[in-house]
Image (cartoon, grey):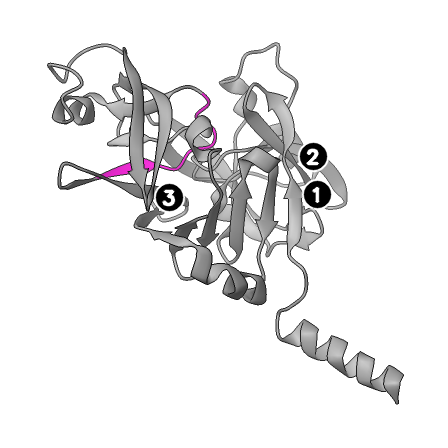
Amino acid sequence: MKTLLLSLLLSLALVSGTIAQETIPLKEYFRDLKQVEVTIHGQVYNFLFDTGGGETFIAPEVAKELGYTAYGRGTAYRMKGERFSYQKIDSVAIQVGKVSFPAATVGVWDIMDILPEELPKVDGVLSLKTFQDKVLTIDLAANQMTLETTASLRRQRSRLTPLKSRFATGLDGSELSIFLEVPRQGRSYWFLFDTGNISELLLSHHTAAAWGLQDDTTSQRIALNPIALQLGNRKLVSPAAAESILYDGVLNYGMIRQTRFTIDFKTKEVWMH
């Protein structure tokens, strides 16, 4: 009878979503760039983890090795306005840690084309798009991500600070990236949430000029004094620079590392711990 009762309790726990969260380790790659082990068709690959990437990419040789034939064309823009095109493949089932994600369309593009040639080979880019039906906590200080359950999110909600956010899906609706509101002087500025930005916190020249940090909007890159940004109920500080970029600003690894962020992709909500 006792054994039966324990079995029933365990079954109820599984159904109600109280099973443990799944932790995904982030491995060192280069400077502050992180990589993640990704399994596709039983093969393990190293993907760069980049929240500002928009699309999850697989290198052309990996796609070929897995038996996929790329087709079509996707177009995207990097933060400084550089346009690049890539092909696509469908029905790619990715596993990260012990978690399998639904088969999805991913881009085919070699990240090594823009990385220094002396760096170790990475096989793709893991973006936020892969997690689009999950609840994800990113903890860069601990070098890990956590896939939350309904129960684990419920336990934390009262301690989390909600942030105003925008979920962007790119030119054709196939990407996924996040912008967070930075209030300043009674106005709202929107900064890309970008763990792949391992340089300074970036401001556009227009933003820097509006904040009184430079005299014009046509300058080359300008190094700025460290800046404190208000996110939720906290101020996070980072070295900063003004550049010619498409957005109001771009958060960097150093600032994102100062706290944990939880993202519910289904409800399109972001919180700070």
Whether pointer 1 and pointer 2 mark residues with C-beta atoms closer than 8 Å, the reply is: yes
Q: Amino acid at mark 1?
A: Thr
The percent position of residue 27, horizontal first and vertical second, equals 66, 31
Give neighbour class at mark 3: few <14, some 14-19, many 20+ (Cα, 10 Å): many
* Label 1 or label 2, whichever comes before in sequence order: 1
Task: Point out residue 79 in the picture as x, y percentages from the top left corner.
Answer: 33, 27
Magenta-span inclusion, residue 129: no
- SS of the residue at dot 2? strand
**Magenta stretch mostly in which secondary structure?**
loop
Q: Is residue 225 visible?
A: yes
Q: Is residue 193 magenta?
A: yes
Say which of marks 2 and 3 sits in front.
3
Q: Identify the residue at the far bottom of this view.
A: 1
Q: Where residue 208 sits: x, y (%)?
A: 19, 22
Q: Is residue 164 left or right of residue 124?
A: left
Crowd class of label 1 (few under 14; some 14 to 19; many from 20; radius 10 Å): some
Q: Amino acid at mark 2?
A: Tyr
Name which residue type carries label 3.
Ile
Q: Compute the Cα span from label 1 to label 2.
A: 6 Å
Tell me where the magenta segment starts and ends, as one range: 189-198
Report the side of 6 relative to 143 (left or right): right
Query: Which residue shows up at 56% across the image and 34% down it?
Result: 141
